[in-house]
């Protein structure tokens, strides 16, 4: 069969591969697969099995379509090449208006939080919100939505979406508590992740406050500073070779040590819009709902 591997031009070859790609030909069940036998016994009943749903499929198919826009992708590639030695990839994506992320759909959020579609609480804080795409999934359930972000270009995008933007440290000084704080794929890009988790615990509403944490597995902490990658000051070393073994290690060596217990967790694909080379980018996420160890087992 004639395929793209016989085309020498990388641009034409990548476009052909994109046009031929089809989500239905991929074994997407591995995105959500968990072997409970490798989980510690206390975690097994807390795992929530997910699958490819309508919202996830829509994001992937939209990413596939965007990756075929030849001149747009060439422009993105040129700008990224010029700016990458100077600024972070996040800021470049914010400037270009691209690179949206997908962590969970609205239905997956409901299942993870164990809430009904009409559940509403007072305050959400999304730390490191990026362009606000994931914040938008959670926002309908809260009266007030607060966000933080380091990137100046992403801050502009968040303001356009009318989220309440707080300074990096100002969220701890507001004088009120949050019903839910989300920390999505931030712990491995944070200089002081354990200190951050302790601060989050203090900022949650006592008893009912919940923390949502997403962590890429395998867990590999690095900081992107001005186009360079550096090791964080507070380095977390997670044990285990499999997704399940690293979930065990995160639970015991990180969450429990700073005063959190796992209430529920799941395995989800962490998706990002693609470029001229790929339809979309995908990493393996473990997504947890955590409660303070001092709280009772009551659901939010």
Image (spheres, grey):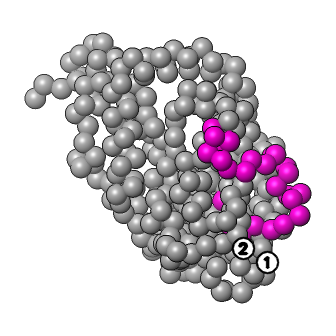
Give the camera-side residue of 35 and 171: 171
| Residue 300 rendering spot, x and y as whole percentages | 64, 79
Asked where in the image residue 96 lies, by quadrant, the reply is: top right
Mark 2 crowdedness (10 Å alpha carbons): few <14, some 14-19, many ≥20: many
| Residue 287 rendering spot, x and y as whole percentages | 56, 62
- Does residue 167 lie above or below 72 as drawn? below
Image quadrant occupied by the N terminus: top left
Residue drawn at (72%, 26%) of the image: 226
Mark 1 crowdedness (10 Å alpha carbons): few <14, some 14-19, many ≥20: some
Residue drawn at (52%, 74%) of the image: 118
Residue 173 lies in the magenta-colored region? yes
* Tag shown at residue 42: none
Range shown magenta: 157-182
Give the camera-side residue of 262 and 178: 178
Residue 175 placement, left or right of 295: right
Residue 234 visible in the current orientation: no
Residue 48 visible in the current orientation: yes
* Tag shown at residue 209: 2
Residue 119 lies in the magenta-colored region? no
Residue 263 placement, left or right of 65: right
| Residue 13 rendering spot, x and y as whole percentages | 28, 21
| Residue 247 rendering spot, x and y as whole percentages | 57, 64
Residue 110 placement, left or right of 222: left
- Does residue 218 lie above or below 111 as drawn? above
Q: Secondary structure at mark 2?
A: loop
Residue linked to disc 1: 206
- Total marks placed: 2
Q: How far apart in space, not on screen, are marks 1 and 2 (Cα)?
A: 6 Å
């Amino acid at each position: 069969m004639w395929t793209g591997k016989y085309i020498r031009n990388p641009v034409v070859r990548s476009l052909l591969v994109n046009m031929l790609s089809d989500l239905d030909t991929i074994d997407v069940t591995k995105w959500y697969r968990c072997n409970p036998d490798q989980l510690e016994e206390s975690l097994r009943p807390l795992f929530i099995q997910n699958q490819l749903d309508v919202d996830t499929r829509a994001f992937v198919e939209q990413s596939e379509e965007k990756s075929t826009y030849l001149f747009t992708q060439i422009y993105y590639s040129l700008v990224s090449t010029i700016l990458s030695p100077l600024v972070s990839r996040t800021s470049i994506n914010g400037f270009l208006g691209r690179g949206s992320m997908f962590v969970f759909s609205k239905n997956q959020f409901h299942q993870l939080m164990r809430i009904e579609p009409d559940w509403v609480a007072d305050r959400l804080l999304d730390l490191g919100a990026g362009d606000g795409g994931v914040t938008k999934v959670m926002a309908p359930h809260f009266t007030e939505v607060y966000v933080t972000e380091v990137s100046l270009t992403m801050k502009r995008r968040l303001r356009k979406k009318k989220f309440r933007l707080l300074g990096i440290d100002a969220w701890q000084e507001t004088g009120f508590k949050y019903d839910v704080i989300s920390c999505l794929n931030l712990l491995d890009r944070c200089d002081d992740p354990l200190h951050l988790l302790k601060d989050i615990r203090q900022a949650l509403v006592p008893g009912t406050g919940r923390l949502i944490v997403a962590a890429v597995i395998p867990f590999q902490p690095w900081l992107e500073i001005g186009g360079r990658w550096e090791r964080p000051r507070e380095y977390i070393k997670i044990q285990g070779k499999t997704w399940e073994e690293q979930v065990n290690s995160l639970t015991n060596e990180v969450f429990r040590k700073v005063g959190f217990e796992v209430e529920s967790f799941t395995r989800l694909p962490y998706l990002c819009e693609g470029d001229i080379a790929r339809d979309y980018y995908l990493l393996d996420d473990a997504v947890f709902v955590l409660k303070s160890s001092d709280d009772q087992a009551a659901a939010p």
